[in-house]
Image (cartoon, rainbow, N blue to C red):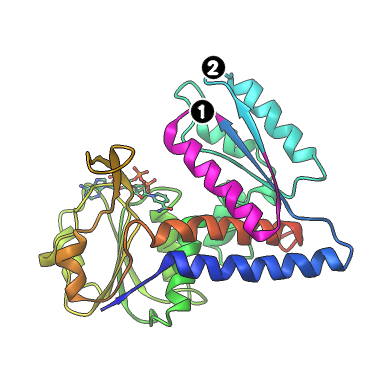
Amino acid sequence: MTLIDGKMTAAAIKEEIKAEVDQMIAAGMKRPHLAAVLVGHDGGSESYVKNKVIACEKCGFKSSLVRMEEDTTEEQLIDCIKQLNEDADVDGFIVQLPLPKHIDEQKVINAIDHHKDVDGIHPMNAGRMALGQPSFISATPLGIITLLKRYNIPTSGKKCVILGRSNIVGKPMAQLMMQKQYGDSTVTVCHSHSATLKDECRQADIIIAAIGRPDFVTADMVKEGAVVIDVGTTRVPDPSAKNGYRLNGDVKFDEVAPKCSYITPVPGGVGPMTICSLMKNTLAAAKREYFS
Ligand code: NAP
């Protein structure tokens, strides 16, 4: 069994990005700039944004954070997005999700200029990606594709089962694993109403679990030699941890790992790659790679 080290892979990619940024600066180009909008004070979102700022520093990017209060109106948030759309110094920006309940998330996403949508969640980018056209790809699925490539894991012609069908993970992941230039796999997507979920998993060469149910994937659901990618990150109470909780994946790691050819840990697997993909997308935005 090989443990897929997302932390190490992400660190190597950030160094590659930094080297490219150094060359851009030496050539007289401006420093790539990623902005983040954070509405409210959700603990998880605060720490995700903090990690994104640290990653920007590692890559040599400029970063800025727009903080808005929990009671910000939809209109105020969309005004802020319009300003970022028009700010020539900002190459890309993200609106940290989830947003407070009174704000329509899709309306907010639709307001982002798709040329600056480095999270790859605007319908224009999601649609282009589905058609196999150049676009910003949703950060987590892009991170997983990058891990599979860097570890030379064969995917072409393999049976891949994806657990979860969310817009940010499951759906784009299925698109990428299906497409010839990425996974080239035979893809099955399972969700909370899938009657044959366990049987599908047992036949899978590759399982990508993204449902947010701790320890859901057990050894009896995994065939010998399978590749298992665990996207799940659920906070579960843990009195022995410094902050009182730990991050738990969707896979029961201890019993599943011995059966796998490759597996990602939680934490240290997919998570660091998500932020790293955001950096890759920001670099592409700064280089105007998807402008058309
Ligand atoms: P989400 O929007 O809540 O979607 C969850 C999906 O899982 C839904 O499609 C749901 O089915 C399905 N599901 C839930 N319970 C299920 C069950 N018992 N059996 C089968 N399917 C079930 O979640 P998400 O945003 O995709 O995130 C999924 C997990 O990945 C979470 O733990 C999240 O924290 C984590 N995540 C991690 C990263 C990272 O960088 N590591 C990034 C993004 C997300 P229905 O559609 O039928 O409701």
Which residue sits at x=54%, y=17%?
Answer: 71
| Amino acid tagged 1 | Asp
- Assign the N terminus to one quadrant of the image: bottom left
**Residue 276 spot, x, y in % from top left:** 55, 60
Q: Residue 76: x and y, percent?
A: 65, 21
- Main SS of the magenta part reads helix
Q: Residue at x 23, y 41 (%)?
A: 238
**Other residues around mark 1 within 10 Å, as few (<14) / some (14–19) / many (≥20):** few
Q: Does the magenta segment cover residue 2?
A: no
Q: Quadrant of residue 19?
A: bottom right
Q: Which residue is mark 1?
A: 104
Pointers 1 and 2 in contact (C-beta within 8 Å): no
Q: Which residue is mark 2?
A: 71
Assess mark 1: CB under 8 A from ligand 1?
Answer: no
Q: Amino acid at mark 2?
A: Asp
Residue 57 position within the rendered picture, expressed as x and y whole percent measured from the top left: 65, 53
